[in-house]
Each structure stands twice: as C-alpha cells, then as structure tokens.
Amino acid sequence: MNILVEGWRNINHSYALVNQWQIFELIKSTNIYFKDVSFSNENWNSQRNDSGLRNEVKNVINKIPLASDNINYDITYRISAPFNFDKKFNSKLIFIFATSEYKNNLFKSDYTNGDPIQLGREKNFFIHTPSNWSKKSFLASGFREDQVIVVPHGVDVETFNLISESEKKNIRDKYNIKSDDYVLTNIGAMTQNKGVEDLVAAYGILKKKNKNLKLILKDQSNLYDRNANSPIKNMQSSKFNQKYQIFNEQMYNDIIIISKNLNFDELRNIYSITDCYVSPYKAEGFNLTPLEAAACGTQIVVTDGGPTDDYFDDCMGFKIESKEKSLNESIYLSPKTNSLIEILDSIINKIDDKKDVRSKLVHKNFSWENIVKKLKKEFENKLSK
C-alpha cells in the first residue's frame, strides 16, 4: 500500500505528534511518502516547539521520502489544521484527520477548500476522527455515517509505564514534593475548554483541610499564547473565590507551574509522581493526556459524557457528573464542581491499589502499534469496496 501523508511533523502540536506516531507504525508495513504542510502559526518550528520524541522515532520520520508525481498512491492522508477539504487528490481514496471539540456543526474557520454537505456525496472521501463525540460533529455537518471512521489515539508504551518508587522519590525531590504530599496534575493548553479553572476551584476548597495537597499545571505556552497563570488569575477574580475565599499564600505557593518544553521521558515523570490526574474538560476531540497518565499507573478523574467515555474503564478512576450546554451554537459539557470536589475529597490520602491494573489495561488496548493496525484495517476495508 502506498500512502501519501500531507501534514505536520517535527513539533509538539497534537496533530503533529499523532501523525508521527502513526507514521512510525505504518511505515513497518506500508510505503509512506510525505508532503510537508505549513504550520497554521508562522512562529512554530522544530527548534522552539520540539516534538520531544525519542531520536529513534525522529530519525524514522525525517527519512521518509518526499512525495513524487511518479508514484501511484492508494491513500492520501491529510493531517493539519485548518482541515484541507479539497476534493482534488492524486490517489484512489483520501482520508482527512480531523477533530471537533464541540458537538455541533463545524465552523467555517475549521476547514478550507470544500463544503461538508457537498463532500457528503463523495464516494472516495473519508474523515478519520478519534472519538465518537467528535464524530457527531461531522455527521451534523453533512458527512455520511460510512464516511466518518473512528480510530482512537494511542500511547507510547515504551515511555509511559510504571517506574520504581526510588525513581519517583528522586523526581519528587526535584520539584520539592514531600513523600506525604498528595499531587493533582493537569497538562494542556490552559484554554477555557480544558476546565482548569474548575480544577483550581476544587483544589482551593480541598486545600483548606488538606495542607499536604499540591497542584501541578503543565501548560503549552510555547505553542499557545496562554500559560497556567491565566486560569489561576481568572479564578482569583471569580465570584467563586469571592464566596469561598480559596486563595491564600500557601494555596498559591503549592501550585507548581511548568511552562518549558518537556520530552516524553520528562512527561512520564510528571505523570508518575502524580497521585491523581484531573481533567474536568468542557470540550475535547479525544483528550489523550489522561490516557497517558493511566498508562503510567496514575488514577484519573475526567468529565462524564465526552470523548473519554470511549476509553474510560472503572479501574482508571472516576467520572465527574456533567450536563450538556450550548453557547453561541457550541454544544459542550459543563462538569459539576461539587461532583469534582466530592470525588477528590473521597480519594485524597487514600491508598491506590490499581496502578498495575490500569497500566496493563492501557498498554494492552491503546499501544500505538495496536491502534495503527486498526487504522490500516480501515484503509484496507475502504480500498476493497
């Protein structure tokens, strides 16, 4: 099978990372050719926004031959943003990787060069999206049921795994975290859809009676013009803080903010020293970080009703009660802060005896090797029709 990939690589944007892991597995059994697509932000580059991947993976990705007019392609696979819906392609079929964080019609700013309703009539045009939540948006926009395939993201099981207690102690010492401290963590863009303000609110309430509680926020300020101080400041000036007075010097000092780029080993270290990874998100296309945390054995708490329902298992942790809401034509989830507080209150300082179980579950079902086998099978099924 000859596959032409038109997309992003070499940076730590989620689309580029997904692309690189998929290529790393696909190239073992298919012929991959690459066409680089310009990043949507002219300031992004491999120096400032390094992917953090192992050199082994980087070398494979960078040695892929470039596209050529002399090759007969079976599949064109586009993975960049905004989504390129141009129905002109030089292959038998085309797949567009695309995600929608909100469960509603796509916005015109999400895509270029096409119209979803018209494309819904195309027989050789397909969408690959990583969750059933995201799929609903593409169906609402005009694509057919059989046009939208759902194949989830995977986890780098070579990196995201259990580490020894002595390693954890060394990493905790690096961040001045004591052995009896209880650590909550969130890693992401710190945009409003991530629900970090809800996490800060819950942390502030629980900090009042749990002096050993700490919060790690790892932002992506190198990609987005927003750091972890944004949700903290928003919560400081909120009516919630006016009512409950959660902010004080100790509460603020026990928030650890990490803004620098981290490689995958360093990310694993953060997941591994975390007692509970908390993601009270409002809108996500997949939400990979809780799955990576679970692969490291870490308990997770995520919003109920969204894309994480596709991979969540009871052994992983707990789901926050939520309601669907709409604002300016955007359908999103509203996690209940009281539910989040009650969940965290019930597990703080309690022994977690499921680390090994959840890690094995993720490794078995969500390795990139297994996930990409499913993606390749979808390619083959569509080609055979």
Image: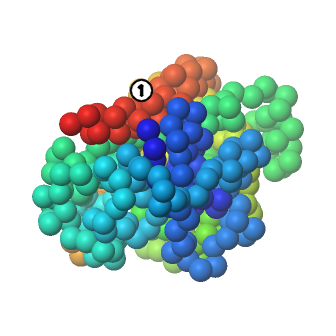
* Front position in the image: 377 or 288: 377
User: How many marks do you count on the picture?
Assistant: 1
Q: Which residue is mark 1?
A: 314
Identified by mark 1, the residue type is: Asp
Quick check: can you spot residue 349? no
Q: Please tell me whether residue 233 is drawn above or below residue 29 in the rendered image.
A: below
Q: Residue furthest bottom?
A: 42
In the rendering, at what x and y percent does residue 279 appear? 48, 50
Look at 64% across and 61% down and name the residue there.
11
Residue that sits furthest to the front in the current view: 70
Q: How is the image coloured?
A: rainbow
Residue 82 in view in this figure: yes
Q: Is residue 169 left or right of residue 314?
A: right
Question: Residue at point 61% right, 37% down?
Answer: 156
Q: Residues within 10 Å of mark 1 (few under 14, many from 20)?
A: few
Q: Residue at x 80, y 42 (%)?
A: 172
Could you say which quadrant of the image residue 382 lies in? top left
Q: What is the quadrant of the C terminus in the image?
A: top left
Q: Quadrant of the N terminus?
A: top left
Give coordinates of residue 95: x percent, y percent: 34, 52
- Element at badge 1? helix
Q: Position of residue 353 (x, y in %)?
A: 59, 20
Of residue 4 and residue 262, the one placed in the foreground of this image is 4
User: Which one is nearer the viewer's eye here, 3 or 337?
Assistant: 3
Q: Would you say 48 lies left or right of 72 here?
A: right
